[in-house]
């Protein structure tokens, strides 16, 4: 495996199609109507998902045009479609996100019933200006909640499939306190009424509306279920209640799987469930065997990304969780894979959706290292020096990833890299993105129509989502729309400081995007609040990638630095198991080398007072430490004991 190869190549080091390992082959060829593939980091889940679809099509155990594959990002959908084409699956049914598939179905329903097409709100932030005004009208100039916080609460409530009344009378006071809960619920209600009055749907409305149509119109539901009988769902640990409810309607429930009219293959890992703050619920994956009685569970236990020391480091993070059930299926490389069917005992303990990874055999590499610095500036300079020292020979800049818990930490690191002449995503240069034809198309549309920015984005986003796979807009346009959504989110963030009576504009977008650095291949979707949006980062060739832990999900690099590994940042919140899982995701991004850094002082945190390393570093150090050499006497004693065991077995 050469450093000259792109570090984020998704197929790197995976077995060829005719050399699947035993667990992968079991997953690909399983006859089960309900199959859960528990896939840890680096285990080749996308490869297995592709091969399972291709195998079922080749063996005629399904008609691919009657299949549906659901992903959580457009990028994942594009990758899966591309892999399926390479596997000669050309007539596959829809491959897309929950939202894009639901939109197509809602649009089809409206067309069939002669209804006017409903507009799509590109982002809740598009209404942030008037929401801010409504908040001040109702609660005065100093309301008990900001618009940004209220929008996050609306996100969570919608993902949890809660009505305004259910949210207000249920979790809101517990989450926010009485005063803020009242304000959030009031703004939620105003938001829903505004959409209804303007015949707007936001993206979560697409899911709830599609679910409502499936439940209320028997003919529509029957037609959907006849058309799509075979379901493949990626990142199952990230399902929220809204998505789960829609998936059940599409399938026809567990009864349809049991009687053979539908089947489902889900892929995921409960240890990588990091979106609970946004309504995701890992109980859907850990309870898979309870919901689909007779389900088969296949665990992909070999890590094809990382060498043994790094796999050990990642496992040490999770095994230090005292509330986590011990995994009964742990194995060393080369032992038989765990392949189970029926209602599993571990489902009752809540551990059914977790994978215990082993590194691929015969690979070696250094244990993780740690460096402490006096302050954040020294830390940033040290990281830049660490990267520069390893950029030798054919090692590429894009084989390095620098990860941090929050976006705020990345600015100093970008500055330090730039000072050494190391290319990175945060270059601070004017973006060539403004020169792309797709950007010009959007700005020209705004000038011609005079529409508000949000309306134009909504129209173009709807067109993009509604298009057939072969007629999808050019990737550049999709990236422009991503950037537009990020701009709307920034307008929401600013709405607490001033009102935007006229809404975002094309000129504002042009000014804003010029401040960002984006390559000709990818863009940064959101620099401002990654915990809310899961920001996507530029992966251009020849540049070090800077990312938050959330943004790093699904990516990998040969060489990884994890910065700010201090108590109070890692974990950011104590007694939150999701923080541990998030760190596990970060640690498992590294393929060859992993380096942790922390600072004894950091301004903006604990008033800049003394800080200490994360307690999780001690767990990693203990797990990856080299055992002390044996003395000659100890070695002789162990050899004698082994011989005694052998002699005893021969006598029996």
Image: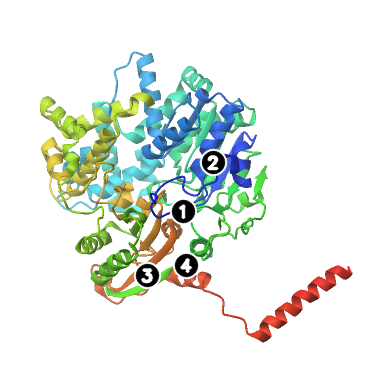
Secondary structure of the residue carrying numbered label 4: loop
Q: Which of 236 and 20 is in front in this view?
A: 20
| Residue occupying image coordinates x 11% and y 25% | 448
Secondary structure of the residue carrying numbered label 3: loop
Secondary structure of the residue carrying numbered label 2: helix
Residue 48 has which mark?
Answer: 2
Task: Between label 1 and label 3, give the one nearer the viewer.
Answer: 1
Gap in Å between the C-alphas at discs 4 and 3?
25 Å
Q: Which of marks 4 and 1 is nearer the N terminus?
A: 1
- Say if 377 sits above or below 114 in the image: below
Q: Where is residue 226 in the image (x, y as percent from the top left)?
A: 53, 20
Secondary structure of the residue carrying numbered label 1: loop
Q: Which of marks 2 and 1 is nearer the N terminus?
A: 1
Q: Which of the 4 image quadrants contains residue 160?
A: top left
Quadrant including the C terminus: bottom right
Gap in Å between the C-alphas at discs 4 and 1?
16 Å
């Amino acid at each position: 495996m050469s450093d000259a190869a792109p570090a984020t190549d998704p197929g790197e080091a995976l077995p060829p199609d005719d050399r699947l390992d035993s667990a992968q082959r079991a997953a690909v060829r399983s006859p089960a109507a309900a199959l859960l593939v528990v896939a840890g980091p680096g285990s080749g889940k996308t490869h297995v998902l592709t091969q399972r679809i291709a195998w079922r099509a080749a063996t005629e155990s399904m008609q691919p045009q009657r299949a549906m594959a659901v992903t959580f990002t457009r990028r994942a959908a594009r990758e899966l479609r591309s892999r399926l084409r390479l596997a000669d699956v050309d007539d596959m049914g829809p491959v897309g996100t929950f939202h894009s598939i639901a939109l197509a179905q809602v649009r089809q329903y409206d067309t069939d019933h002669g209804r006017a097409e409903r507009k799509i709100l590109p982002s809740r932030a598009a209404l942030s200006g008037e929401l801010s005004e409504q908040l001040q009208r109702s609660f005065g100039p100093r309301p008990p909640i900001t618009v940004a916080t209220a929008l996050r609460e609306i996100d969570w409530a919608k993902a949890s499939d809660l009505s305004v009344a259910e949210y207000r009378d249920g979790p809101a006071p517990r989450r926010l306190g009485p005063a803020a809960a009242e304000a959030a619920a009031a703004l939620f209600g105003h938001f829903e009424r505004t959409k209804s009055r303007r015949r707007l749907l936001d993206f979560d409305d697409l899911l709830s509306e599609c679910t409502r149509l499936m439940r209320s119109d028997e003919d529509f539901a029957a037609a959907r279920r006849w058309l799509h009988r075979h379901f493949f769902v990626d990142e199952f640990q990230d399902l929220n209640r809204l998505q789960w409810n829609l998936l059940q309607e599409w399938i026809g429930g567990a009864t349809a799987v049991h009687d053979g009219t539908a089947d489902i293959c889900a892929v995921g890992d409960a240890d990588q469930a990091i979106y609970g703050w946004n309504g995701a619920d890992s109980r859907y994956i850990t309870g898979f065997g309870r919901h689909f009685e007779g389900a088969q569970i296949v665990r992909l236990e070999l890590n094809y990304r990382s060498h043994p020391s790094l796999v050990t480091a990642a496992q040490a993070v999770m095994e230090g969780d005292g509330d986590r059930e011990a995994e009964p299926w742990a194995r060393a490389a080369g032992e038989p894979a765990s392949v189970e069917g029926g209602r599993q005992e571990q489902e009752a303990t809540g551990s059914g959706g977790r994978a215990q990874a082993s590194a691929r055999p015969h690979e070696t590499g250094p244990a993780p290292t740690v460096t402490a610095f006096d302050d954040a500036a020294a830390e940033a300079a040290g990281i830049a020096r660490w990267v520069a020292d390893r950029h030798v020979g054919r090692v590429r800049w894009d084989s390095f990833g620098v990860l941090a818990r929050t976006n705020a930490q990345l600015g100093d690191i970008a500055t330090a890299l730039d000072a050494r002449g190391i290319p990175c995503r945060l270059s601070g240069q004017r973006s060539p993105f403004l020169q792309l034809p797709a950007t010009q198309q959007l700005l020209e549309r705004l000038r011609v129509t005079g529409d508000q920015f949000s309306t134009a984005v909504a129209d173009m986003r709807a067109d993009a989502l509604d298009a057939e796979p072969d007629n999808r807009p050019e990737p550049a346009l999709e990236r422009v729309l991503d950037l537009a959504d990020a701009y709307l989110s920034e307008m929401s963030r600013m709405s607490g400081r001033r009102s935007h009576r006229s809404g975002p504009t094309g000129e504002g977008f042009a000014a804003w995007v010029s401040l960002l650095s984006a390559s000709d291949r990818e863009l940064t979707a959101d620099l401002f609040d990654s915990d809310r949006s899961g920001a996507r980062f530029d992966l251009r060739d020849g540049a070090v990638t800077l990312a938050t832990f959330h943004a790093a999900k699904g990516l990998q690099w040969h060489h990884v630095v994890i910065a700010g590994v201090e108590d109070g940042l890692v974990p950011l919140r104590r007694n939150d198991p999701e923080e541990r899982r998030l760190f596990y995701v970060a640690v498992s991004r590294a393929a060859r080398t992993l380096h942790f850094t922390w600072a004894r002082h950091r301004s903006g945190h604990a008033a800049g007072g003394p800080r200490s390393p994360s307690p999780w570093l001690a767990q990693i150090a203990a797990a990856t430490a080299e055992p002390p050499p044996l003395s000659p006497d100890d070695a002789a004693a162990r050899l004698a004991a082994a011989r005694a065991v052998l002699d005893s077995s021969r006598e029996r």
